[in-house]
């Protein structure tokens, strides 16, 4: 239902005789073609059609692309949610923001199994860029299917145990019917470096920096935050936290015991100006260049309590998500204009991925020995590269399914086949409300952003339909050029001619008058400018 041919809004429905399990309930961030949109959610249409079969939601970890649509989902479906301790902590905070107080949240641990809706679900420890990540093995009437979740094989993790390769091997011996595997880094050869590499870079940065240090990271990257805290301890720096999600997640991780940040090391934002620059490190949001995030406001000089300048060091400890490159670049440029030293990948190894590279994918495929593979979690090219890796290990090409959102597989008697797709568009969160992409809102916004708009105001005699005086034509966002001098006057003449023609034909229906204005003026403007602005006719009866 999401996560195929894209990064984000991961969601898969597993339907059997006992009902439907939903693995993850993620969201995505809007791209530049979605002006004004806050979030992008999977299409719930299929779930609504089978609402009586919904049994539970299973979460693999606490990142937004896997849990972000849960508040919207739980508004419609009263089902239990199974997740690990930190994942539930982050989810609980998110649900409170949405005013959802009675969700059925059930804590599980890696190594544990639960029975729900005729399925047996086992949780297997994996490493990712957030603690408490798990793979999910689901025993169904048709066989054993495994979802990797987001994972990498980190033999020296910051927290917890390495990925449980032994358990994955045991599942492989049991017999895996189908494996739904993370494909994000399938293009990258070799192995993803350990998170500890970033900790070594932080120590070097802290050793050299003489002024204030500001570290921007994903607020959910608790491992990264812990390494900043450890470097701060070694160099006797205090820690300030800014950015709403960073403040919230740091508090949750501290409360649940996933972040060792003593209270005596913490500085209130309002006290930052009183701390010598050499004694302070600031943890902040904004690693993706989000316009309203704390780092962007620091870069623009609009943050309420933090100013950055010469002598300060900013570390952007994250790679830009595809589509965010320009925003991140603008933030870096604005910081550098202020004299700040900015460190970012690939200049220094201040970020490593949380996803498995090609050799790690080979290890998991070899251990699980699945009969069928469904590459998930990635753009189309990522899915193809994952499929190619599996084929190189001997998995038959006909046993590898490259699906799109809405694609369905049926497993019966140990065999798999494609069946008819289901609805799998997207829903857009716009100011807290939901909008279907089919309602034309995005097309209108894109048209406005590209070509602008014309408002035509015509005063019409209510009895005879005659035009009374010249119509007014007002444009907004429509770029006039030297070659378009007199265009507005010509547009007025065109509208006058249209209305005179409709009057001769005794057309008095205002809907038809508006359509005539829209059609004639649109044709005229396209002939003259090759643009199609939005045209809004207003008829005033006199």
Image (cartoon, rainbow, N blue to C red):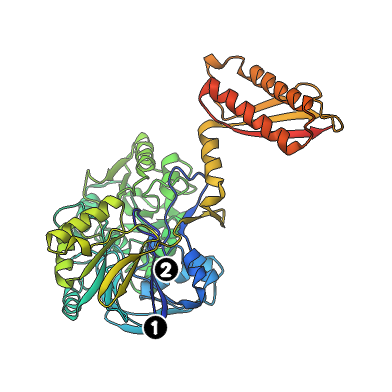
Give the image location of residue 180, x and y in percent: 28, 66
Residue at the (42%, 75%) spot, across then down = 20
CB-based contact (under 8 Å), mark 1 and mark 2? no
Q: Quarter-wise, where is residue 413 in the image?
A: bottom left
Circle 1 Cα neighbour tier, 10 Å, few/some/many (<14 / 14–19 / ≥20): some
Query: Relative to residue 465, is residue 306 depicted above or below?
Result: below
Q: In which quarter of the image is the N terminus?
A: bottom left
Give the image location of residue 168, x and y in percent: 19, 75
Q: Mark 1 points at which residue?
A: 116
Closer-to-camera residue (489/27): 489
Q: Quadrant of the C terminus?
A: top right
Q: Residue 443 carries which label?
A: none
Q: Which residue lies furthest to the front in this view?
A: 505
Q: Would residue 518 appear left or right of 389 to someone viewing this image?
A: right
Local secondary structure at mark 2? helix
Residue at the (17%, 63%) spot, across then down = 396
Q: Would residue 400 appear left or right of 459 to someone viewing this image?
A: left
Give the image location of residue 354, x and y in percent: 26, 60
Q: Mark 2 points at which residue?
A: 90
Q: Quarter-wise, where is residue 88 in the image?
A: bottom left
Closer-to-camera residue (433/365): 365
Circle 2 Cα neighbour tier, 10 Å, few/some/many (<14 / 14–19 / ≥20): many
Mark 1 or 2, closer to the camera: 1
The answer to whether one can see residue 250 in this image is yes
Q: How many labels does the image show?
A: 2
Query: Relative to residue 49, is residue 401 depicted above or below?
Result: above
- Closer to the N terminus: mark 1 or mark 2? 2
Q: Distance between the residues labelled 1 and 2?
A: 23 Å
Give the image location of residue 523, x and y in percent: 58, 26
Local secondary structure at mark 1? strand
């Amino acid at each position: 239902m999401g996560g195929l041919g894209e990064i984000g809004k991961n969601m898969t429905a597993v339907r059997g005789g006992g009902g439907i399990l939903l693995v993850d309930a993620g969201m995505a961030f809007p791209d530049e073609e979605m002006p004004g949109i806050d979030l992008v959610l999977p299409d719930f249409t299929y779930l609504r059609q089978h609402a009586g079969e919904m049994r539970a939601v299973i979460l693999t970890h606490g990142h937004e692309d896997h849990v972000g649509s849960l508040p919207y989902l739980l508004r419609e479906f009263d089902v239990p949610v199974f997740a690990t301790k930190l994942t539930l902590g982050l989810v609980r905070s998110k649900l409170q923001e949405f005013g959802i107080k009675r969700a059925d949240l059930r804590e599980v641990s890696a190594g544990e199994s639960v029975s729900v809706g005729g399925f047996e679900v086992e949780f297997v420890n994996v490493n990712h860029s957030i603690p408490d990540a798990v793979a999910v093995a689901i025993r169904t009437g048709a066989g054993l299917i495994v979802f990797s979740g987001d994972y990498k094989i980190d033999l020296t993790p910051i927290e917890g145990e390495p990925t449980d390769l032994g358990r994955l091997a045991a599942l492989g011996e049991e017999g895996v019917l189908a494996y739904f595997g993370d494909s994000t880094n399938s293009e990258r050869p070799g192995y993803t470096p350990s998170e500890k590499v970033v900790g070594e870079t932080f120590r070097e940065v802290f050793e050299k920096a003489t002024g204030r240090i500001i570290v921007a990271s994903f607020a959910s990257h608790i491992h990264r935050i812990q390494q900043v805290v450890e470097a701060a301890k070694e160099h006797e720096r205090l820690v300030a936290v800014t950015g709403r999600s960073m403040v919230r997640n740091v508090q949750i991780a501290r409360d649940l015991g996933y972040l060792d940040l003593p209270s005596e090391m913490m500085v209130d934002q309002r006290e930052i100006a009183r701390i010598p620059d050499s004694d302070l490190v600031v943890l902040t949001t904004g690693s993706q260049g989000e316009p309203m995030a704390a780092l962007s406001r620091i870069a623009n000089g609009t943050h309420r309590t933090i100013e950055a300048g010469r002598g300060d060091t900013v570390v952007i400890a994250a790679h830009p998500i595809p589509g965010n490159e320009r925003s991140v670049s603008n933030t870096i440029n604005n910081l550098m204009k202020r004299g700040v030293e900015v460190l970012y990948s690939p200049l220094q190894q201040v970020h490593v991925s949380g996803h498995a590279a090609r050799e790690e994918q080979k290890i998991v495929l070899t251990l699980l020995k699945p009969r069928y593979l469904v590459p998930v979690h990635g753009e189309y090219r990522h899915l193809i590269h994952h499929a190619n890796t599996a084929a190189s290990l001997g998995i038959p090409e006909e046993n590898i399914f490259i699906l799109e959102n809405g694609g369905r597989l049926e497993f019966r008697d140990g065999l798999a086949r494609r069946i008819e797709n289901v609805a799998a568009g997207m829903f857009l969160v716009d100011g807290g409300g939901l909008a279907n992409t089919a309602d034309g809102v995005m097309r209108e916004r894109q048209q406005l952003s590209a070509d602008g708009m014309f408002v035509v105001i015509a005063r019409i005699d209510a009895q005879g339909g005659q035009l009374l005086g010249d119509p007014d034509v007002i444009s907004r966002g429509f770029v006039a050029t030297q070659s378009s001098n007199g265009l507005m006057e010509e547009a007025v003449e065109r509208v006058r001619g249209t209305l005179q023609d409709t009057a001769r034909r005794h057309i008095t229906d205002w809907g038809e008058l508006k359509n005539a204005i829209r059609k004639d003026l649109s044709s005229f403007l396209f002939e003259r400018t090759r643009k199609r602005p939005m045209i809004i006719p207003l008829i005033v009866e006199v």
